Image: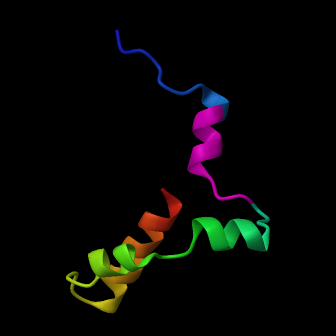
Amino acid sequence: MPQEFLTTPERLRYQTVPASLLEADIRQHFHLTEADRAFLLPFRGAANRLGLALQVCCC
């Protein structure tokens, strides 16, 4: 039987974006580094790069 890695409240917290964020949190967690930007460059299309950038920032 598989074991639960996260509790239900932990899983819900990780699956949602908070309704309000402090500017300091936004700068820390949602800023692409130069390495992130270099990673995104090979992907085709602005929409693909934007979607991937959102995934990088939210993880």
Residue plotted at (65% across, 59% down):
17
- Vertical position of residue 6 compared to residue 29: above or below: above
Q: What is the x, y in percent for residue 49?
A: 34, 81
Q: What is the x, y in percent for residue 40?
A: 30, 79
- Vertical position of residue 57 compared to residue 42: above or below: above
- From the image, give the main secondary structure of the stretch colored magenta: helix
Q: Is residue 16 magenta?
A: yes
Residue plotted at (47% across, 20% down):
4
Q: What is the x, y in percent for residue 23?
A: 76, 74
Residue plotted at (62% across, 40% down):
12
The quadrant where residue 8 appears: top right
Identify the image quadrant of the N terminus. Answer: top left
Residue plotted at (79% across, 68% down):
22
Q: What is the x, y in percent for residue 9?
A: 67, 32
Residues drawn in magenta: 10-18
Compare residues 17 and 22 and report the one nearer the observer. Answer: 22
The quadrant where residue 47 appears: bottom left
Compare residues 10 and 28 and report the one nearer the observer. Answer: 28
Residue found at the very far front of the displayed protein: 34
22 relative position to 4: left or right: right
